[in-house]
Image: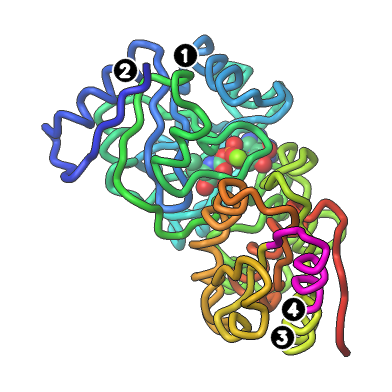
Amino acid sequence: MTEVIAVRTVDEGDPGLRRAAEVLCSGGLVAFPTETVYGLGANGLDGRAVARIFAAKGRPADNPLILHVASEEEAARLVEEFPAEAARLAAAFWPGPLTLVLRRRPHLPPAISAGLPTVAVRIPAHPVALGLIRAAGVPVAAPSANISGRPSPTTAAHVLADLEGAIDLILDAGPTAVGLESTVVDLSGGRPRLLRPGGVTVEALRAVLGEDRLILGPGDATRPASPGMKYRHYAPEAPLTLFLGDPASTAAAIAARMREAAAAGRRAAALVHTEALSAVGGAGLALDLGPRTAPEEAARRLFALLRRCNTEGVDAIFVQGPPEEGLGSAVLNRLYKAADGRIVHVGG
Ligand code: TXA
Ligand code: MG
């Protein structure tokens, strides 16, 4: 049985938080909100509890987990050293959607790091997450609370849809604010390296580190390499095709594919910016990514819209790529993964 508790306050004595902390401390699994996505938490110092996370998600054992803490002092206790650039990033972005990969201390369960000499750490900005970590008094290991391969959950209902019966408790505090996972930066090898774009933009990292300091993963910002990034991810059930190019050309190309699908008796969904909704509507399901000028809206909505495509049972999904800047780059990264090679370039 999976219990769901709505958390309305984050007072010390909140019964929901106290109950969740008890479950964590006795080796159980608790899904909880962060500002990015819902996480699936276990006591990060308890190897058996950590193993339950991998089992519940069907997660490959070579994909390491993030430890969530409530203060920099706690983060420092998990790692061999906290280099000066890590401290500058932490000062700028913690609490917040930034994960730092650092050299790990030996007392941590090996499964946390999937055998690597490093550990990923972050201080989340959500008051419920911070309250839970403080109430439990241990670092909380938490990947996104979805079945491996599916879109990350941005509501408690998404968590239930994937993990009902497989976990002990869900703390429900409504939809998450950022909607995409944290940015992962590796500081274990000298120069900072971007492993996964996310809630903190590359532009913001560069503003703190200096323009030329950050190494992007192999290739470019949209194809970085964290162990987790090699697996199929964010996959809706219907094939997803990503359209790249100027907004008028992508809207026209998607509208044409929607009409083609309808003529063939198939139902397609278009995920497009608000400005293109009327152009693609009429021949299928038109879903709104938000205004083109507001990539934070696309970030907030993307995973819920991909899940909606599953529940609507569409046969095909056509997506208009957001501009490749700011949070738009992180949205594009997730869309590349979801498209699994189905990319169409249109226009100039
Ligand atoms: O926003 C987030 O990061 C959410 C919330 C719950 O905090 N968590 C999350 O966790 O997205 P997960 O497990 O779905 O993604 C963690 C990513 C994976 O790509 C994983 O491979 C990478 O971080 N990672 C974890 N530990 C690492 C390490 N030691 N070295 C390199 N990459 C690591
Ligand atoms: Mg994940």
In the rendered image, residue 46, in percent from the top left (x then y), is placed at 47, 13
In the rendered image, residue 67, in percent from the top left (x then y), is placed at 50, 33
User: Which numbered marker is on residue 247?
Assistant: 3
Residues at marks 1 and 4 touching, judged by CB atoms closer than 8 Å: no
Q: Amino acid at mark 1?
A: Asp
Q: Amino acid at mark 4?
A: Ala
Q: Residue at x 75, y 71 (%)?
A: 258
How far apart are the two marked residues, 1 and 4, measured between alpha carbons?
A: 52 Å
The residue wearing badge 4 is: 255
Magenta stretch bounds: 255-268
State the image quarter where residue 58 is shown.
top right
Q: Amino acid at mark 2?
A: Val
First along the sequence among labels 3 and 2? 2
Residues at marks 3 and 1 touching, judged by CB atoms closer than 8 Å: no
Q: Quadrant of the N terminus?
A: top left
Q: Amino acid at mark 3?
A: Pro
First along the sequence among labels 4 and 2? 2
Q: Residue at x 65, y 58 (%)?
A: 197
In the rendered image, residue 79, in percent from the top left (x then y), is placed at 54, 32
From this view, report whether residue 22 is shown above or below residue 120: above
The residue wearing badge 2 is: 23
Residues at marks 2 and 1 touching, judged by CB atoms closer than 8 Å: no
Q: Secondary structure at mark 4?
A: helix
